[in-house]
Image: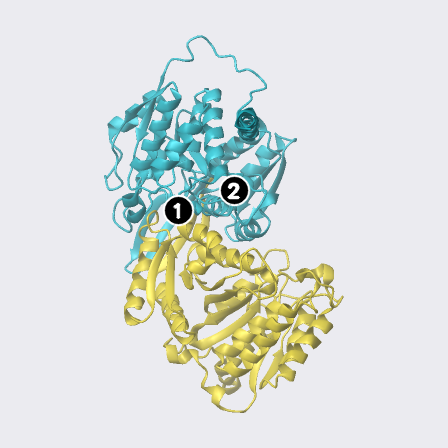
Chain colours: A yellow, B cyan
Amino acid sequence: MAFKQILSRALRSRPDQILSSPSAFSAARAFSSAPITATLFPGDGIGPEIAESVKQIFREAEVPIEWEEHYVGTEIDPRTQSFLTWESLESVRRNRVGLKGPMATPIGKGHRSLNLTLRKELNLYANVRPCYSLPGYKTRYDDVNLVTIRENTEGEYSGLEHQVVRGVVESLKIITRQASLRVAEYAFHYAKAHGRERVSAIHKANIMQKTDGLFLKCCREVAEKYPEIKYEEVVIDNCCMMLVKNPALFDVLVMPNLYGDIISDLCAGLIGGLGLTPSCNIGEGGIALAEAVHGSAPDIAGKNLANPTALLLSGVSMLRHLELHDKADRIQKAVLETIAEGKYRTADLGGSSTTSDFTRAICDHL
Amino acid sequence: MAKRSVPLLKQLLSSSAAVSSSCSSRFTSHRSVTYMPRPGDGSPRAVTLIPGDGIGPLVTGAVEQVMEAMHAPVYFERYDVHGDMPKVPQEVIDSIKKNKVCLKGGLATPMGGGVSSLNVQLRKQLDLYASLVNCFNLPGLPTRHENVDIVVIRENTEGEYAGLEHEVVPGVVESLKVITKFCSERIAKYAFEYAYLNNRRKVTAVHKANIMKLADGLFLESCREVATKYPGIKYNEIIVDNCCMQLVSKPEQFDVMVTPNLYGNLVANTAAGIAGGTGVMPGGNVGADHAVFEQGASAGNVGNEKVTEQKKANPVALLLSSAMMLRHLQFPSFADRLETAVKHVIFEGKHRTKDLGGNSTTQEVVDAVIATLD
């Protein structure tokens, strides 16, 4: 009896935190031809349809991935304090990669939000959003090609607020050396691995001297280890203005939590909105959870009208993390070509195709 | 033959002059309602002038020149303040308290050093709790976005700029963001009052209350309370990241925006960027007793060394801010003349500084404005 308890406790214990050295980021499994298991959270609303679309395209492209699907539960799991079950989280920890569709946050109290649960339990510390203009889908900006890397665990979003006296509220912004070093390391590693030339740290250290000052110090330390990559620091108001005037000035941006949130959404707006933007969350030990950041769009759920581009491109970034670059390039090329052609476009891009038509068009382009 | 062609030529020249004057008459000011001053209103008013750092002296010099050319009833009391001073000198504060109005260039804050920003200090000491930036498309200036006419009203004294930071243990730093009902209420009141007095239809509150539930929640509560007192003005709320996304794709949906301190900085600079750049947007800071006018959005208000050396800074923002100042001082006719002249120079496009795509120096733009003044 005691043995069973010990065994079950051992099975449920979390895997050791592997030192976050750059080598841990790449999965050595890419060299094996055995299928890689990945967790898939289809999500709510349009989630299941676009997840289906992604599975179909990956099958056609012969990507060696086996999906393990998990759904959000209908009641709160006491082990995670949210609607996500412990099994789902264990699955991501085991597989090290995952793809997540849009999840509607249930309204109510007494549970953590789903995104917060994932972030805290999987220790997802960096959010990476590659933003590039899609050829053929015209927005006011044609030459966007940048990557925003946002610290995801602390900063202004620590959630530590309290009312001092009636009518006076304090909110704490926390910056630690450890978290800043971690995200700066990842940013420079990413820049090197993807052939990017410049990393810009975004801050407001002229006003918040100690907090953003610490963040900058950590970035400078890491920059010294990568002399081939140019490093610069830009104040956030300058950055906002330069982004809307000339986004080609930026390459890789690394920033603390709040600025990252705002700037990454701003960049998404430059290229056409959240429906087209991929996103990937990196966790300790090389975990990567790619996700589509748009909403679940309950009004078009089930009608075969949804645009799977965001989830697809997120899947592509997941493949790149797994170092399956040739498959990633193939699928990305097919998606961009389909959109550039303009014959099959879903309603949000100004066309009238259904999800299945769009998916089939991409499969044809593979 | 030559005898007959001379009157013909004269007619042609006069008709072309008429055409060009009708073109410029589009920009001449016509006041439909006469402003009736009180006796003695025309006596010159003193205005504190702080040239500042970097391009500051250049652009404030531009304003001085234009004011003189217009014979505007203002005279400037100049004080030298630089960004690396530990605090704003008491004589400057006293001068502003006496004159009630100040015009200033940017003050450069040394990065990461122990000196707190003098711009922020000035605002806190004089309790200038509302910062206003007016971002609009200037006719004749090509931008990617049309129909932009946004006023960003930003709380100026608390929020993230409280300056309360400390190191908990080595490697862990905390910064306090303070939101009080008092400050949120008064900025909301100012925003709605501004909208009411300037015939604006909508006020949008920008927040991040889904994450910072207590802090931004308090801000929103205050805005909602004030909104009920102005039933004629539409009120809505938008989360700051969505707001930035909407600003770059559909800026025409925004009218007046009221925000806490940090978001206001970002939103104002983004809005200024989409409407033509921070070199042209006017703005100022106002409190219950004093007003300080400066270049609207804060990015680039000190410029960089190259621009300062080559004297190619853009004076338009400060000129338009000084027009706002003239209106604040109740000299509306001078304000109109100045604005019309500046807008005409921009529309013509012959004298534009580098940030607007041209190659003129500050002095050339100023001369053009003076020449266009009627």
Residues at marks 1 and 2, CA–CA distance in whole angstroms? 43 Å
Q: Which quarter of the figure is the C terminus of chain A placed in?
A: bottom right
Q: Is residue A131 left or right of residue A358?
A: left
Residue A251, position as x, y percentages in the image:
42, 64
Nearest-to-viewer mark from 1 and 2: 1
In the image, residue A91 above or below residue B321: below
* Res A78 seen here: yes
Q: Pick out the residue farthest to the front.
A: B1
Respond whether the residues carrying marks 1 and 2 are from the same subunit. Answer: yes
Residue A243, position as x, y percentages in the image:
46, 54
Label 1 element class: helix
Q: Give the class, few, some or many, for how many residues have Cα within 10 Å of label 2's Cα (few <14, many ≥20).
A: many
Quadrant in the rendering for residue A228: bottom left
Judging from the image, mark 1 belongs to the subunit labelled: B
Judging from the image, mark 2 belongs to the subunit labelled: B
Label 2 element class: helix
The amino acid on which the numbered mark 1 sits, given as a three-letter code, is Lys
Q: Give the class, few, some or many, for how many residues have Cα within 10 Å of label 1's Cα (few <14, many ≥20).
A: some
In the image, residue A80 above or below residue B167: below
Q: Pick out the residue farthest to the bottom.
A: A33
Q: Nearer the viewer, residue B172 or B10?
A: B10
Q: Which mark is residue B218?
A: 2
* Res B109 seen here: no
The amino acid on which the numbered mark 2 sits, given as a three-letter code, is Leu
